[in-house]
């Protein structure tokens, strides 16, 4: 039974970086990927806070990128039946939506990382989410599309209300 979220995190971060690619070469692509992965990691840990949650999503599957592809205008039909795109089945729409919200709202990202720390996740290393929480000018240039609020709005708005409810003061991650 899968008890970690690495396939979901990798696939969802991959989807974000393909939908909102970096411009500027290999370094920009790497910086964009790191920012996407950090946002997706925070979102996934919030969405699936326990090993049991991770195991359950490993059994039932996260749902895939179909609706996200449609919303962003990707040609989802080109991916059907193509084994090279099987990773798309591991994309989690809610996690992608939450990550998009975190990438476009620095205060929301800070609240989310704080909630993780209070919920027991190991976030003691302050640099773990530095590129998400405090991107420098190079990070921002590399991820200009990935952090653009207007471009990410259709994805972020899908499930942002659930994220906001989860991050309300006094609310615990594990019931």
Image: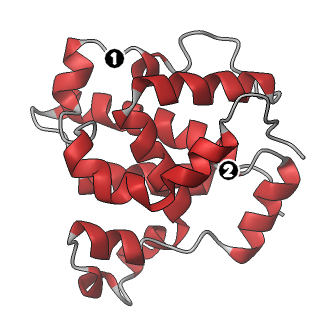
At mark 1, the secondary structure is loop
Indicate which disc, 2 or 1, sits on the residue closer to the N terminus.
Answer: 2
User: Could you say which quadrant of the image residue 169 lies in?
Assistant: top right
Q: Relative to residue 142, is residue 33 depicted above or below?
A: below
Location of residue 133 in the rendering, given as x and y in whole percent from the top left corner: 45, 19
Identify whether 24 is placed above or below 98: above
**Residue 64 placement, left or right of 145:** right
Q: Residue at x 50, y 30 (%)?
A: 108
Residue at 45%, 75% (x, y): give it: 86
Q: Position of residue 80 (x, y in %)?
A: 35, 88
Q: Secondary structure at mark 2?
A: helix
- The image quarter containing residue 75 is bottom left
- In the rendered view, does 165 fall on the left or right side of 133? right
Tell me if residue 2 can be seen.
no
- Residue named by callout 1: 135
Q: Is residue 96 above or below residue 86?
A: above
- Give above or below for 122 relative to 74: above
Decide if residue 93 is on the left or right side of residue 143. right
x and y percent of residue 113 in the render? Answer: 61, 25
């Amino acid at each position: 039974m899968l008890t970690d979220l690495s396939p979901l995190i990798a696939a969802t971060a991959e989807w974000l970086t393909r939908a909102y690619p970096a411009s500027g070469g290999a370094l920009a692509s790497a910086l964009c990927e790191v920012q996407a992965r950090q946002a997706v990691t925070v979102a996934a840990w919030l969405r699936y806070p326990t090993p049991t949650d991770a195991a359950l999503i490993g059994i039932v599957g996260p749902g895939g990128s179909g609706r996200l592809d449609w919303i962003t205008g990707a040609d989802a039909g080109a991916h059907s039946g193509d084994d090279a795109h099987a990773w798309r089945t591991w994309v989690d729409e809610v996690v992608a939506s939450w990550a998009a919200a975190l990438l476009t709202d620095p205060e929301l990202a800070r609240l989310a990382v704080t909630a993780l720390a209070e919920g027991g996740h190991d976030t003691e290393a302050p640099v773990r989410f530095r590129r998400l929480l405090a991107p420098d000018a190079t990070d921002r240039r590399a991820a200009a599309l990935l952090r653009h609020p207007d471009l990410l709005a259709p994805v972020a708005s899908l499930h942002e209300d659930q994220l906001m409810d989860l991050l309300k003061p006094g609310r615990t991650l594990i019931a």
